Amino acid sequence: MKTTNKIIIVDDHLLFSQSLKLLINSFNDFEVVNSFENGKEFINHLQENPDTIVDLVLLDVNMPILDGLSTIKWIKENQPKLNVIALSVNNDDETIIKMITNGAKGYLLKDTSPKIFQEAIIAVIEKGYYFTELVSSILINRIDSDSKKIILKEKELIFLKLACSEKTYKEIADEMCLSPKTIDGYRESLFEKLEIKTRIGLVLYAIKNKIVFI
């Protein structure tokens, strides 16, 4: 029997939140199990119920009391494995970059179509991320402007190319005849050098800088 994916909505616009709940509950194998009007309510719930099991959090960026950015920073520090998709009416570069670099696995505008929305929540739960063409474009441009003069070592380049494949980090370690710990070191080194937080960020950097081709 397939497990139902549990979703939490954190959004101060009640009409939007309720409509979103109805939409999600209409999808197969998805259920909204709770909703909160701001980040403070959500964090209090997690602290009071440490055994809460949730597959995905839909987090509004602009909320009173505690906004989405402050909330996701708390999540990054205290619940880093929690999957979060940021929701907003704004598509400005800085907001998107701040949310993504602080741990959001996706960023959707509130006028996103139900079809794209469903694709996004499935992708984040199954693959760990979902970026629309808009968000990918913004991240690529940011990476390009921030990292033009960065020089990578030969082993880092080999690792980066392999990271753009479907191989797991363990498989990459085997192919490079290195220990998983050494591979973790290469990954963290690149994250720091390129100011990237995720594997998809490495892929976007490699594509933009013609290290790999698609």
Image (spheres, rainbow, N blue to C red):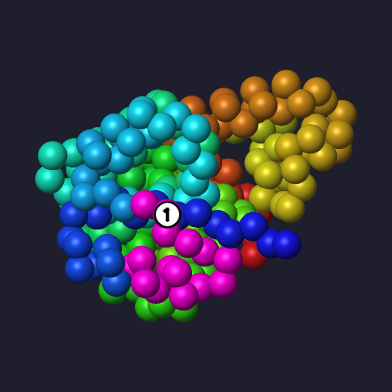
- Residue shown at 20% from the left, 68% from the top: 15
Q: Is residue 142 visible?
A: no
The one nearer the camera, 166 or 123, is: 123
User: In the image, what residue occupies the spot 52% across and 36% down?
Assistant: 81
Q: Residues within 10 Å of mark 1 (few under 14, many from 20)?
A: some
Compare residues 60 and 94 and report the one nearer the observer. Answer: 60
Magenta stretch encompasses residue 118: no
Choose top left, top right, bottom left or bottom right for residue 68.
top left
Residue at 21 percent of width and 45 percent of height: 38
Front residue of 123 and 152:
123
Asked whether residue 125 is in view, the answer is yes
Q: Decide: is 189 above or below 133.
A: above
* Residue 41 image position (x, y, % from top left): 24, 39
Q: Secondary structure at mark 1?
A: strand
Task: Please state the extent of the stretch shown in magenta in the rendering.
Answer: 20-34
The residue under the point 52% across, 64% down is 30
Q: Is residue 55 left or right of residue 113?
A: right
Q: In the picture, which quadrant includes the C terminus?
A: bottom right
Q: Could you say where residue 127 lies in the image, as x and y percent from the top left?
A: 61, 54
Q: Is residue 32 magenta?
A: yes
Q: Position of residue 191 (x, y in %)?
A: 52, 32
The number of callouts visible is 1
Q: Quadrant of the N terminus?
A: bottom right
Type of the residue with mark 1: Val
Q: Is residue 13 left or right of residue 188?
A: left
Looking at the image, the residue that sits furthest to the left is 64
Residue identifier under label 1: 33
Q: Position of residue 148 (x, y in %)?
A: 44, 42
